[in-house]
Amino acid sequence: MTQKTSVQTEQNNKELTGADYLKATLCAAVYDIAQVTPLEEMEKISARVDNQVFVKREDRQLVHSFKIRGAQAMIASLTEEERKRGVIAASAGNHAQGVALSASKLGINSLIVMPLTTADIKVEAVKSFGGEVLLYGANFDEAKAKAIELVKEQNRVFIPPFDHPLVIAGQGSIAMELLQQNPKLDRIFVPVGGGGLAAGVAVIIKQIMPSIKVIAVEPTDSACLKAALEAGKPVDLNRVGLFAEGVAVKRIGDETFRLCQQYIDDIVTVDSDEICAAVKDLFDDVRAIAEPSGAVALAGLKKYVAQHNIHGEKLAHILSGANLNFHSLRYISERCELGEKREALLAVTIPEQKGSFLSFCQLLGGRSVTEFNYRYHDEKSACIFVGVHISKPSEKEALIHELRTAGYQVVDLTDDEMAKLHVRYMIGGKPCNAIKEQVYSFEFPESQGALLKFLKTLGTNWNISMFHYRSHGTDYGRVLAAFEVEGNNLEFGKHLAELGYDCHNETADPSLKMFLTNQP
């Protein structure tokens, strides 16, 4: 009971030092519920990157995430009076489960506010751990605002997901375990969302073994720590990618930023394809099925090793969670080879004549074709969409050179997001007659009425000439749609603004011009 009073009193009077956090971590009642998780060697990835790679298996916690540590550390510190009041948290996943389980074990009533779009599997998990669930709001920010409102109305204690000294100290227990399990580590790679885990690990490591480097890893589309480091203070991101939802945070915490700025040695960002490749690596090596955010640290480790030409070191990364929406596996399996740079996507123009496809395949030199899409273009030529398995990135450039030398027109679509996300599933959709149309990509909230709103706002005013939707099991669905409207139409722009969904004009995208539209 004295832990909370000591730490919070010191925080109110001055900034907590590294020694303060070390003491708080040592005193935290984490192991009343949390487990010491194994540190396993990944033999296959170790051989591939020429370093000894270890994975810290936080997916083995009862809630399949490290979040139980911070939640338990703070909830266990509550006074008897605070416990009687009950606790409340806002979360779309792992923090919610940690709070529910910790509160239930201590006989404390817990209320978790979760966005309306939260997957059923996560809602049911919170309930199974004894938490009461209130579904509210379209996103985390709205759910959090509601939770803060209920703190005042119901006099509950708010349990923050990352930006609190006790939560940070609880996450720091992972660092203590890492040092006990392998004190000869050279670098530790840590995923960053709100920064609680990274701050906790870094501050403890630097108190005990400062020679060990701590590397922060963030998704490129939700890099709130990187943005804060560049600005010199926490800042709001304009937009946050939701693929790795466990680390999809708009703004890093104030205290977590202070600690990360002081103790983190370096930072690296990774894209969604690189994360998908890391999910596959974890399954191949230790048979763990990580959620995307859980594989972020491994993705960063692989990229950092390649960028800095690191060999012969002992490297650890934290598999932070495994609360995966099962339907996300479809997207991950489709993108992992691209993330590993083992697949090339090409648009190739070949003659429209007998034997031309055979000649093209022979030119591939026995390489495995992963995808092939064809649509009649005209009497002279045909444009094909082809995926080819490659063993290393340089092989793609060699293949493109061979095809061009043989007289083929080739466009590399490997890094074209429109091609990977939509066009590969829509080959053959060019209209018979030339029409004036504009093509837009949209992000729809996966909620009831979202499509109806779209059709009411745009579909009744302009003809929709193309529409493609593919669910990836996240909070937002991605849509590609074309409208019979000329460019710079002010009335159309007005209705887009009224719709309020994130959208981008994709009319000039080369893959669309090749396979789906008649745009010049």
Image (cartoon, rainbow, N blue to C red):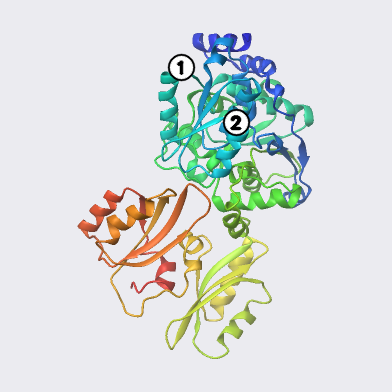
Residue 152 falls in image quadrant = top left
Q: Which residue is mark 2?
A: 198
| Number of the label disc, if any, that sits on residue 155 | 1
Q: Element at badge 2?
A: helix
Query: Where the C terminus falls, by quadrant?
Result: bottom left
Q: Is residue 359 visible?
A: yes
Mark 1 or 2: the one toward you: 1
Question: Which is nearer the eye, 208 or 169?
Answer: 169
Q: Amino acid at mark 1?
A: Asn
Residue 356, compared with residue 32, is above or below; it is below
Q: Are marks 1 and 2 in contact (CB under 8 Å)?
A: no
Residue 159, compared with residue 243, is above or below; it is above
Q: Amino acid at mark 2?
A: Ala
**Residue at 28% across / 71% down in the picture?**
436
Q: Is residue 245 left or right of residue 291?
A: left
Q: Element at badge 1?
A: loop
| Residue 495 horizontal/vertical position (percent) | 25, 54
Query: Where the N terminus falls, by quadrant?
Result: top right
Dot 2: within a 10 Å radius of its alpha carbon, few (fewer than 14), some, or many (20 or more) residues?
A: many
| Residue 32 horizontal/vertical position (percent) | 71, 22
| Residue 426 horizontal/vertical position (percent) | 47, 69
Q: Is residue 519 left or right of residue 204?
A: left
**Residue at 45% across / 21% down in the picture?**
151
